[in-house]
Amino acid sequence: MIFYPEERLAIFIDGANLYSAARGLAFDIDYRRLLELFSTKGRLVRAFYYTALVEDQEYSPIRPLVDWLDYNGYAMVTKPTKEFTDAMGRRRVKGNMDIELAIDMLEMAQFIDHAILFSGDGDFRRLVEAVQRKGVRVSVVSTIRSSPPMVSDDLRRQADNFIELQDLAPSIMRNHPVREEIHRARAEPVDEA
């Protein structure tokens, strides 16, 4: 990774894309550790997280994450999903956040030196090119090590830096202390006196 301490950084996380990439690599993201890691790489101006939410569900599994991120240093950008019926009559849910991410990155370009895009979506290639023309370096974080690879080759080529998500895993993965404690308890002898 190529970072300079005086750089103003902004993080742009395509939530659904990052979740799929991390799942493909079999680890969970610790968003506190992710923020801490990039805070040491430069002057972190803002960290955006983009996700669509199903509005009519009584409980959404992503709601606790969204609330936690909102209270812990992330600028949350959400919108309700759209429900439709496809040509085969199946119920589908759509929640694309590409436009929101693109607008925010273009607006932030004048205030930052380096944008870190957590997405492998090839639709962002032109966005990366436009932001680079404004003098901003762009690093793309995704993976080529999952099966299938989660990053578009065009996006990877356009970026100033490509950061393999699996290489970041030791620094940003969530530890599962409950599982570790259970494993440790099973391994340790119990004094039954």
Image (cartoon, rainbow, N blue to C red):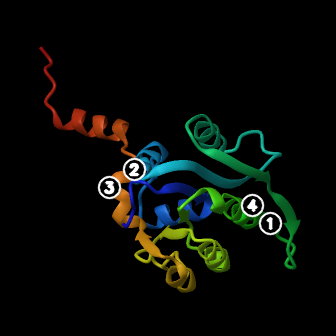
Q: CA distance from mark 3 to mark 2?
A: 11 Å
- Can residue 61 be seen here? no
- Can residue 182 be seen here? yes
Mark 2 and mark 1 residues within 8 Å of each other at the beta carbon? no
Mark sitting earlier along the chain (2/1): 2
Q: Disc 4 designates what residue?
A: 100
Q: Position of residue 46 (x, y in %)?
A: 58, 49
Amino acid type at image mark 4: Glu
Is 171 placed above or below 180 here? Answer: below
- For image coordinates 44% across by 77% down, the residue present is 144
Q: Disc 1 designates what residue?
A: 92
Left-right relation of 121 to 24 = right
- Point out which mark residue 37 bears: 2
How many numbered marks are there?
4
Q: Disc 3 designates what residue?
A: 170
Left-right relation of 20 to 166 = right
- Point out which mark residue 182 bears: none
Q: Nearer the viewer, mark 3 or mark 4?
A: 4
- For image coordinates 48% across by 78% down, the residue present is 149
- For image coordinates 48% across by 76% down, the residue present is 160
